[in-house]
Image (tube, rainbow, N blue to C red):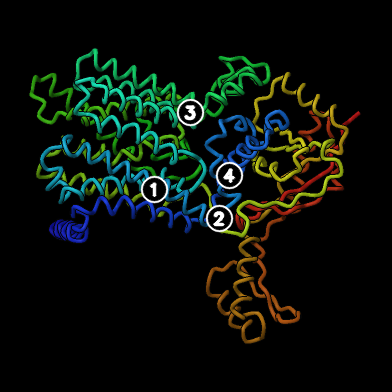
Amino acid sequence: MRFAKNLFVGLENRFQRYSAVLAQPRAPGMAVWLVPVLFGLLSIGLGQDDNWDLRNYHWYNAYALLNGRLDLDMAPGQWQSYFNPLIDVPYYLLSTTLPGPLVGFLMGFVHGLNFVLLLAIARQLLGTGSNSNSNSNSGGGGARLPILLAAAGVCGAGFLSQLGNTMGDNLTALLVLGALYLVLRGWDSLHGASGRVFALMLLSGLAMGLGTGLKLTNAPYAVALCLALLTTPASWGVRLALAVTQGCAVAVGILMAAGYWWLTMWERFGNPLFPQFNNVFRSPLAQQLGVIDNHHMPHNALEALAWPLVFMVQTVRVSEIPLKLAVVPALYVLALLFVVRWLANTMRSRPAAAALSPRARFLMVFGLVAYLLWMKLFGIYRYLVPLELLAPLMVWLLVERMAAPRHAARIGGWLLAATTLAVFPFVSWGHAGWASQNVSAQVPPLARPADTIVFTAHGDPPMGWLATFFPRDVRVIALAGGFPESPAWLERIQSAIAARPGPHYVMLAAARSGKEDSLQRKRRLADSLGLTVDAAGCERLAWFTTRVRFQVDVRQVDEEGRRCTLDLQQRYVSDLPARDRETLDVAKASLTRYGLAIDDGACETYAAAMGAEPFPFRFCPVTVKP
């Protein structure tokens, strides 16, 4: 026990010594420049964005908007083809004009600006929202604590998993945090309801509205901010005026970011959010469904009550990748303990010695409402990124209110150290190596593009991004994907087929093996090291492969300039032709429902890639059944 205590004390002293530079007055100014640059460099290190959604609809949607494809194609990116594409345009334009590593740096740098806003928010709260320890003993210096809490915020599993990618949660978090910061910046003047205060509310609401219009999954934060304003230290009339002003500005911001697109969707499909919420708008062109992707929500009230603990243990319930989730569950447990303690003190008529300050209470209400709405509407963890970013700050505020002053810094520090370090090594939604072309594909020459339809026949792997490489006159139509087809939608497909005499084609994902891709890299490495040019090199290569799990064997060859090569060990060999046949058989059965037949004997394979990651596809002629 004594050894453990001495160990912890030693680590604390060492940390205080090494982090002393953060206590200097100039440290925040340096951090706001340095941290975004570091995130830009980390984004370069991660590689070319290769997330599933990018290949499904992010890349296609921007292309479709810029090239007027809405009336020509039919859901190449599945039902997500009809999301507001404005958020995807910057990345598309950057990636089609700049080298990939530069694009990666810019994306990472912009995402890193969340640190700047977190630092500003933390300084607003820790200046008046904490006890006297906040700027001294509770972190060891006035600048150090806000910097450390902001750093912990941008080390969350959800945020890091999306660093440099196109999913949009990290990007729009800037607008959510910016809206929150503007309210806190004018906090001391809120009770006066001056023109400056309402101007801040308008700017805050516009920022939140823009974030929500660009990505509707930010709606919980917009509602939460309006409701949290009702807790400000002002008269009820002023509180209501602030909330209404904020709400109206949010509405304006949403219309600025999404109004044009919603109007376009209404005119084309009779549903501004097509095809989602069609149980409300009842467009005949889609099934009468609400939120299409709703399988990430709690199954019952008991699960809902313990939801953060459930998804901490069963990450698959809220994410398709194995995120290491710790800080949000920790925040949830602390919040429950705080509420229990507050209720106990209230029932015993004890003074609320550890009551939250008005600013801290405002932040907690914002977080609580946003979390509850997120859980009810979505349940997908990556939509919780803004709250995850704020979670370390909220954890700190709760700990210093519940723990004795002499222990608060130690408890909060170790808790946040544990929840932060638990994230590493972090996982991402997919990255590829950099290549001379950020996104590339070979497509066959088409004799009559204006008469041709290219179909897709599966939703996974996604094929939307490949639609951007065909001639502009070609029509791309998704069949048997994830779109909620209705009879009217099927009629529209048949009308499109009847209007074009052909030839028509279907593109299918070609089977590929990660082991095969790895083999090619290992072969190139062995060649570059000169280990395959003579017998001595081949012997060294064979010695190495028998002592390291390289998953390859050395095979002797008699070629000019090469005496050996590498082959995959048999247990790692995948039967790619068999997998291609299986994909083709499923596609043939699916297309039969649409009156189409695949000429499987005439299929050709073409190369395509995201960065250096190959995604070959098969291109097969299709005929219309009589």
CB within 8 Å, label 3 to label 2: no
- Disc 3 packing (10 Å; few <14; some 14–19; many ≥20): many
Query: Which residue does the numbered mark 4 point to in the structure image?
Result: 92
- Disc 4 packing (10 Å; few <14; some 14–19; many ≥20): many
CB within 8 Å, label 1 to label 4: no
- Residue 375, can we see it? no
Compare marks 3 and 4 and give the one earlier in the sequence: 4
CB within 8 Å, label 1 to label 2: no
What whole-number distance in Å separates the C-alpha atoms at marks 1 and 2?
A: 18 Å
- Disc 2 packing (10 Å; few <14; some 14–19; many ≥20): many
Q: Decide which of 310, 605 is in the foreground and name it.
A: 605
Say which mark, if any, is on residue 213.
3
Q: Amino acid at mark 2?
A: Gly
Query: Which residue does the numbered mark 2 point to in the structure image?
Result: 100
**Side of 611 where 591 appears, left or right:** right
> Circle 2 — which element?
helix
